[in-house]
């Protein structure tokens, strides 16, 4: 939680951007895991509520009345029975005072405020909900069915929140750096534990344990797998095998901000020649981003520059062929890179994705081609600005089912050497990911320590520590 003035100033700026009406920001409630009293812990507050109202307690709703320049936090004080189980919790009034809000009211009072606003034909701004309990709450308060709430969300409010949250304040960058420092220990621990015979689940569990010990927990479900070609491969009971690659995509959340890194390691601690050939391409693409990303550059252009670089290098290995520009235009590179180069990151690991990726990652000049495989998965294409935090995560994947489908259909056969590609079906996948801050003149890694990723330093780290 930042100082009180941070939240006062943020709400004041939000009022200016939205202009009129009332804004309702819903905090989250406790969510049951498998029965009512067994809830996910710790509770994760809604990020936009946190950004403007700063408090982590469940059952709160923030209201900003732009026209009357008033703010209120709605919520109920907990009773003695709750205190017995959960300990002392400050009153809603005390929580409100901590973030510069003078007025509070019981949660039940929000209904009459909404009814009066609807009767007066005032504009009520809400963000698109993503939890079903919030959807029910909105239906009770505003009469909007859950199936219509995404469309009923205020575009003006969405655009204002995206504008504010996209550019990170200095204190936010410090928080992200702290999360990245924990991410360093998560990934280097995995690198030291990797060896034949150890299970994926064991290493994934150790990575998660560090996030829970040094931070608030993971920022997303840890991906650790020898099947790096599966984008979201959860750790399994499978034992690591000599000659395979292990991919670890993990991050933590600390003080409401996230980290997100990926490393791919040889199980034996040394790359084979074939692995090194593919790895060096991903490494070059990853490092190219650091050279060119800066304010004013469209991240979509960086993405496709990486795709062209990757295509050229895969042609050298005989896996691709033909004209590079035509191959990328046809989407042939998506056989190997079916996702985008990166995404915004901050309070959410995919920052503000719930508000609509089209508003977060794009503008009118960078709308993605939703009809083309691979390009339809771009999450970030807009012009970079100082203070943005984006991920840089190129990868090369050999997905047997995708190879079979494209080969059977003859899709992009003029650009892909399917005969040679068949010999890579057992390869897996490689991804290298880091969190990047866009600075005044360029960009830089976030975190005070760099997780080893250059082949020689990675092998040395795995074998000498």
Image: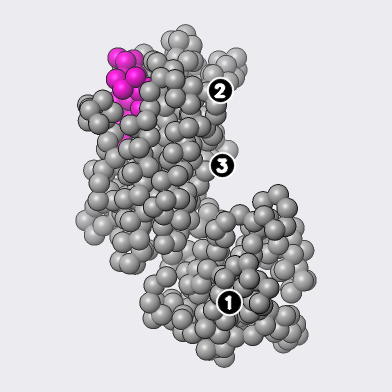
Report, in whole angstroms, how far the alpha carbon at label 2 lies from the one at label 1: 47 Å
The C terminus sits in image quarter: top left
Q: Position of residue 423 (x, y in %)?
A: 45, 10
Report, in whole angstroms, how far the alpha carbon at label 2 lies from the one at label 3: 19 Å
Q: Residue at x 57, y 81 (%)?
A: 91
Asked if 189 appears above or below 92 in the picture, the reply is above
Residue that badge 2 annotates: 402
The quadrant in which residue 315 appears is: top left
Asked if 354 appears above or below 138 in the picture, the reply is above
Q: Residue at x 60, y 14 (%)?
A: 408
Counting residues from the start of the chain, the first of labels 2 and 1 encountered is: 1
Tell which of 292 and 10 is nearer to you.
Answer: 10
The N terminus sits in image quarter: bottom left
The numbered mark at residue 47 is none
State the scheme by which the image is colored.
Answer: one colour
- Give left or right: position of 422 versus 455: right
Residue 246 visible (yes or no): yes
Q: Position of residue 5 (x, y in %)?
A: 39, 81
Residue that badge 3 annotates: 370
Q: Residue at x 28, y 28 (%)?
A: 462
Q: Residue at x 61, y 54 (%)?
A: 40
Residue that badge 1 annotates: 62
Camera-nearest label, 2 or 1: 1
């Amino acid at each position: 939680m930042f100082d009180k003035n941070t939240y006062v100033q943020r709400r004041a700026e939000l009022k200016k951007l939205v202009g009129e009406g009332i804004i309702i920001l819903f905090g989250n409630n406790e969510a049951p895991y498998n029965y009512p009293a067994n809830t996910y812990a710790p509770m994760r507050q809604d990020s936009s509520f946190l950004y403007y109202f700063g408090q982590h307690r469940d059952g709160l709703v923030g209201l900003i009345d732009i026209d009357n320049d008033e703010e209120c936090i709605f919520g109920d004080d907990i009773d003695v029975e709750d205190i017995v189980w959960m300990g002392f919790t400050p009153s809603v009034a005390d929580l409100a005072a901590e973030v510069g809000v003078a007025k509070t009211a019981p949660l039940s009072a929000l209904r009459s405020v909404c009814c009066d606003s609807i009767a007066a034909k005032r504009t009520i701004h809400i963000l698109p909900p993503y939890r079903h309990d919030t959807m029910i709450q909105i239906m009770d308060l505003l009469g909007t069915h859950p199936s219509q709430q995404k469309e009923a969300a205020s575009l003006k409010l969405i655009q204002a929140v995206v504008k504010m949250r996209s550019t990170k304040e200095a204190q936010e960058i410090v928080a992200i750096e702290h999360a990245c420092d924990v991410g360093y220990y998560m990934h280097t621990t995995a690198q030291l534990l990797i060896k034949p015979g150890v299970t994926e689940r064991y290493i994934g569990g150790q990575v998660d344990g560090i996030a829970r010990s040094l931070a608030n927990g993971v920022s997303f479900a840890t991906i650790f797998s020898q099947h790096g070609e599966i984008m979201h491969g959860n750790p399994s009971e499978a034992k690591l095998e000599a000659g395979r690659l292990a991919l670890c995509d993990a991050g933590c959340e600390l003080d409401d901000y996230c980290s997100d890194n990926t490393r791919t390691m040889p199980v034996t601690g040394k790359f084979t020649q074939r692995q090194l050939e593919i790895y060096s391409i991903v490494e070059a693409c990853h490092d190219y981003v650091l050279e060119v990303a800066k304010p004013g550059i469209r991240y979509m252009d960086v993405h496709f520059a990486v795709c062209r670089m990757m295509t050229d290098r895969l042609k050298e290995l005989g896996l691709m062929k033909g004209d590079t520009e035509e191959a990328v235009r046809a989407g042939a590179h998506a056989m190997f890179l079916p996702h985008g180069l990166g995404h915004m990151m901050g309070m959410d690991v995919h920052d503000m994705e719930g508000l609509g990726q089209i508003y977060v990652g794009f503008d009118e000049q960078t709308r993605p081609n939703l009809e083309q495989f691979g390009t339809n998965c771009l999450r970030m294409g807009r012009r970079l600005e100082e203070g943005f935090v984006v991920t840089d995560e190129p990868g090369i994947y050999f997905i047997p089912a995708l190879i079979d489908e494209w080969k059977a259909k003859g899709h992009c056969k003029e650009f892909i050497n399917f005969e040679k590609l068949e010999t890579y079906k057992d390869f897996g996948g490689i991804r290298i990911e880091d969190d990047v801050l866009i600075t005044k003149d360029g960009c830089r890694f976030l975190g005070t320590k760099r997780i080893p990723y250059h082949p020689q330093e990675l092998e040395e780290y795995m074998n000498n520590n």
